[in-house]
Structures are given as C-alpha cells and as structure tokens.
Image (cartoon, grey):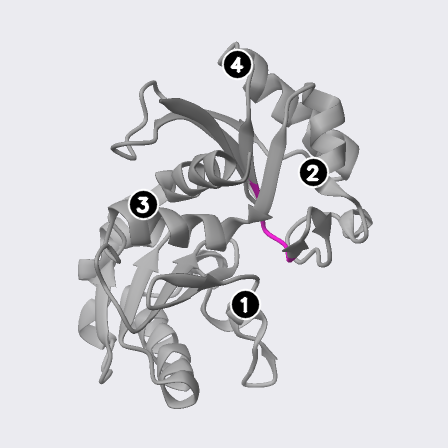
Amino acid sequence: MELLGIDIGGSGIKGGMVDLETGLLTRDRHKIPTPQPATPKAVAGVVVKVVEHFEWEGPIGCTLPTVVRQGVVHSAANIDKSWIGVDGERLLRKATGQKVALLNDADAAGIAEMRFGAGRDRGGVVFILTFGTGIGSGVFVDGHLHPNTELGHLEFKGMDAEQYAAARVRELEKLTYKAWGTRVNEFLQHLENIFSPDLFVIGGGVSRKIGKFKAYLVLDTEVVPAQLRNEAGIVGAALTARDRL
C-alpha cells in the first residue's frame, strides 16, 4: 500500500509516494519552493500542485512547521503568522478535495525514524532533532510520541535556540563546522541537563554531513544521524495519514 506524504517547510514544499511497508519512496519526490509570504492560501495552492503532480486521489499526510492540535494551527515561526488559528486540515481538505491528516513536521520526521530509521526498536527517551531553517523536535518515550514539543523555541542564551544553532544560522553567519558544531553541542547539553534522554537522532539535511561536526559533540547521550534524511517528513506524514484516516 502506498500513500502521498507532503512536507511543508520554510523553504520548500516536497511530496512523495510512500510504500508504507518499507518506508521507501516509490517515485522521485517532487519539490516546489515555499511561497513568500507563506500564507494559508498560497501554501494550499502549492499543496494542490504537488497532489496534481502525482495524480493522487486518496488520503494525504501533510506536515507544517507549527504546533498542530486536532488539525488547528497554533504557532507560526517559519511560515506566515496568518496561519495561527486556522483549521489547517479543513483548509487542505477543501483545496485538494481529499482527506488530509495534518501534523507538526518534526513529529512526522520522528515517526518515520522510529518506524524505519535510527530510532527503530529503541526504547527509553529518544529525541529526533531536525536542523534546517529552524530546529524541529520529535520526542518519544518508549516509542510513544509526545507531540508538538518545539524544542527549537526553548529560550537559550537569551533567544530561541534555533536562532543560535539552526543549520540556517551556520549559513547566514558563515560559521565553520567547528564553530557551528560547538553551538549545537551547547544546545544538546542544555537538553541533556533538562531531560536526560537516552538517544539524540540528528536529522535534516545536516544528517549526511554529521562527520564534519560530530567530533565537537561532547555529550553523555548517544548521538546518531537520522537515516531517512530529508525524506523523513514525507514518510512520517504518509504513516500518519494511514493511521488516522
């Protein structure tokens, strides 16, 4: 069985058909830049284009870089503020004409990693952290998701943690991997001191470059790269659509 997963990010909206038994994409993913400003109407229009690209009719899993509770958006850090209070599931259902399950993007990535990737068969407290435009987080206790943690917005050094250690910050400030890795280490130590996790899984595009900064991660907690990389959100969205719809 396959379903369509769509991952809405701050810079791109990407979708793919997911084999739910293997977690693999059955066709090349399709990516469209996120419209600016990323208003509900504009984003919904791009989602429709992704659905049309795959000529898909059926349940759709979709992520947003926001807190999502029962389909309603409650935050908007990396998309337009006009999303706050919007019933995102209803909006996307109306736009696409299909059933839609909507969830936080990092939660979706975490679901995929726990099912098919670096968190598979791992108990205890597992943090999946995605470093990209911001810092997303999926937190699991014995395999069960605690949704909408948004740890990238913890106050750290007088700012949101993602303003200090997101992958985008490394690019904007032209930091070396050593300098940026040191920042990431400080943030992870902060999480370690508060939550005492058993495993950190580092996701996002930086997961395939972890060799460039892992030496600067000096922690008591085990740290491993995500295995599904930039496809994790798509896969987790599709899994969620199957489970909910």
- Residue 233 occupies quadrant: top left
Label 2 – label 1 distance at C-alpha: 20 Å
Tag 1: amino acid: Thr
Magenta stretch: dominant secondary structure: loop
Observer-nearest of 92 and 205: 92
Q: Secondary structure at mark 4?
A: loop
Q: CA distance from mark 4 to mark 2?
A: 17 Å
Q: Which mark is residue 222?
A: none
Q: Which residues are magenta?
A: 63-67
Q: Which mark is residue 149?
A: 1
Lateral position of residue 239 relative to residue 51, left or right: left
Tell which circle, 1 or 3, labels the residue nearer the N-terminal end.
Answer: 1
Graded by Cα atoms within 10 Å as few (under 14), some (14 to 19) or many (20 or more), the crowding at tag 1 reads: some
Q: Is residue 16 visible?
A: yes
Q: CA distance from mark 1 to mark 3?
A: 20 Å
x, y percentage for residue 142? 33, 68
| Label 2 crowd bin: few (<14), some (14–19), many (20+), radius 10 Å | many
Dot 2 corresponds to which residue?
89
Question: Is residue 232 toward the left or the right of residue 57 in the image?
Answer: left
As measured in the structure, the alpha-carbon distance from the residue carrying label 3 to the one carrying label 2 is 25 Å
Q: Is residue 58 above or below residue 239?
A: above
